[in-house]
Amino acid sequence: MFFERYSGTVNVYYLEKPGVAKNADGSKCSAEFQAADQLYKRLSDHLKFLALQPELQKMPARSIAVLGFSEGGAVAPYIARDSHKIGWLATAGSGGLSQSEEFLIFADRGVEPYAKPFSRDYFLHVYADIKKDGKSLKKEFFGHTYAYWSGHLFNDPLSVYANLGIPMVAAMGEKDESVPIESGRALRDYFLKHPEKDFQFVEFPGASHGLRTGDRNGAQEFIAGLAGWFKGDKKAFELK
């Protein structure tokens, strides 16, 4: 669906998390899934795939694009950092702040459920507990195990973006309900001070986490823009 408006020919590879049962409804995760649902595992799986998949194995350095939406957008910069084959980084629905900071922003803004029934104090208490017991597959927070959160909550994605030397684009919806727009704007503001870096930030006015505004499918617009962006078109993402 994402590529329906993409104007060129493209090969898309999508790596699913291990342990996803066929026809699963998402109400209960398998033990295999829980054990593998960690950032380091997702990263290592993608790097192994890039190294071993026959067609990708033939590709030269800086010839593959990595695209991540939402949680995938949090993983994609690390793939770009650790694989010499990645020549472009595109993300949507993720930003430059740590996830722990993002939750606190929502709590301070009064956004439910971060502010009610939860609170800043509650999050700080849980953060401390996760830091103490970060390998636990039994303790859970917001639907994920502590082992999952210990790999995601406290990372500094901005520092990863800052050290990349490839073209980068990040898109977010202004009214994103899962990641505060402040996180995307943190990337924007950093790179405004570093014009030597090839970075663009695309903010969809009034749009949701999925870049949707009413009937407007911003995700498809963003993906369509990649076709020109890969060729160096600086206006590829101009919103109409």
Image (cartoon, rainbow, N blue to C red):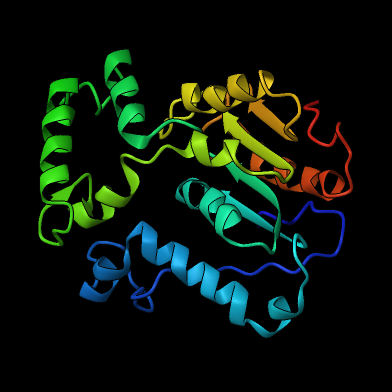
**Image: 7 above or below 201:** below
Q: Position of residue 130 (x, y in %)?
A: 16, 44
* Residue 3 visible from this viewpoint: yes
Q: Position of residue 221 (x, y in %)?
A: 74, 41
Q: Residue at x 68, y 85 (%)?
A: 54
Q: Position of residue 237 (x, y in %)?
A: 78, 34
Q: Residue at x 65, y 25 (%)?
A: 191
Q: State the image quarter where residue 110 is shown.
A: top left
Give the left or right position of residue 82, taking residue 85 as reference: left
Q: Residue at x 82, y 43 (%)?
A: 229
Foreground pick, 30 / 184:
184
Quadrant showing the N terminus? bottom right
Residue farthest to the top, as pictured: 109
Total numbered labels placed on residues in the image: 0
Q: Residue at x 52, y 75 (%)?
A: 48
Residue farthest to the bottom, as pictured: 54
**Image: 190 above or below 172:** above
Quadrant showing the C terminus? top right
* Residue 217 visible from this viewpoint: no
Foreground pick, 197 / 45:
197
Give the left or right position of residue 159, taking residue 85 as reference: left
Foreground pick, 14 / 200:
200
**Image: 62 above or below 154:** below
Q: Position of residue 236 (x, y in %)?
A: 84, 37
Give the left or right position of residue 238, taking residue 74 as reference: right
